[in-house]
Image (spheres, rainbow, N blue to C red):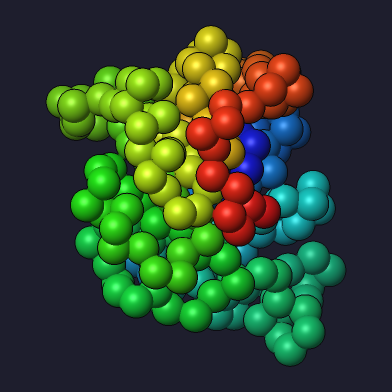
Amino acid sequence: MSGLVLLTDRRQVAGGRALVEVVAAAVAGGVRWVVLREMDLPRAERLALAAELRPILIEAGGILAAAGPDPLLDNAIGPAGTTVCAIGSRPPVVLHLSAGGPYPPPDADLIGRSCHDEAELRQLSTEDYVTLSPVYPTRTKPGYGPPLLPGGLADLIRLSPVPAIALGGIETPAQVRACVEAGAAGVAVLGAIMRAPDPQHTAAALTTAFHEATTVGRSPNASTKGET
């Protein structure tokens, strides 16, 4: 997982728009990785959301990941009415797990894990990537931290055995660039796009900042093991 990653939170969506509409706008702005959270919803409603979002990502060549150990594929309908969980036609199973478990991770095509400190990084086993948070103070989780800031992010990236995605309070192109300079393989945002008056414009600006930063050069501290 790399580039600009969008984490969903329908409660943060501005202007009365639907979550699917915001994700579609973000994808139009360049986002190719989306992590479906909405953990408070009943499973049937999360399945329905996944069934709506997955074709949007597939059409753009992107990936929908599910937060938690449930891949949210049951009875999901893909493009042209195909059942995506049918043999040979399902999309990759990508799970993003919390620091709290499960350990070891379940089987999947790609596994991510939320981490916040060295102790949690040391628990990793077969994960493919991690998110490291919070990098900055975050309006989504006020008081959560303390924030790593780019220096602390770089320190944890040096300890990580897998590529790291920066997460938490990242809202501006300058912050995206700082995370890349610290060695992040990707940058995850939530409120910056969920709350944006124009999600497509915001996604495009942050995606451009990421790609510009990566072309300038990446910190030699960045981990490359298992990078996708």
Q: How far across and how far down the image is residue 112, in percent?
A: 46, 58
Above or below for 171 versus 162: above
Q: Image quadrant of residue 75?
A: bottom right
In the foreground, 205 or 220: 220
What is the x, y in percent for residue 175?
48, 16
Which residue shows up at 62% across the image and 43% down it?
A: 2
Q: Is residue 213 left or right of residue 225?
A: right
Location of the C terminus (image quadrant): bottom right
Q: Please tell me which residue is depicted at 22% across the width and 52% down the height of the picture.
A: 119
Which x, y percent locates residue 53? 62, 54
Q: Nearer the viewer, residue 62 or 175?
A: 175
* Relative horizontal placement of residue 180, taking residue 105 as reference (left or right): right
Q: Looking at the image, can residue 39 be seen?
A: no
Count of numbered circles in the view = 0
Residue 195: percent from the left, percent from the top? 45, 23
Q: Quadrant of residue 84?
A: bottom right
Question: In the figure, is residue 165 to the left or right of 38?
Answer: right
Which residue corresponds to the image point at 44% horizontal and 23% vertical from the top-left?
Answer: 170
Residue nearest the observer in this picture, 17 or 195: 195
Which residue reaches farthest top?
174
Q: Is residue 35 visible?
A: yes
Q: Residue at x 64, y 37 (%)?
A: 3
Farthest residue, direction front: 220
Note whether 178 is above or below 108 in the view shown. Answer: above
Q: In the figure, is residue 168 to the left or right of 222?
A: left
Residue sitting nearer the eye, 74 or 161: 161
Q: Is residue 31 above or below residue 172?
A: below
Residue that lies at the very extreme toward the bottom in this rendered image = 87
Q: Is residue 52 above or below residue 215?
A: below
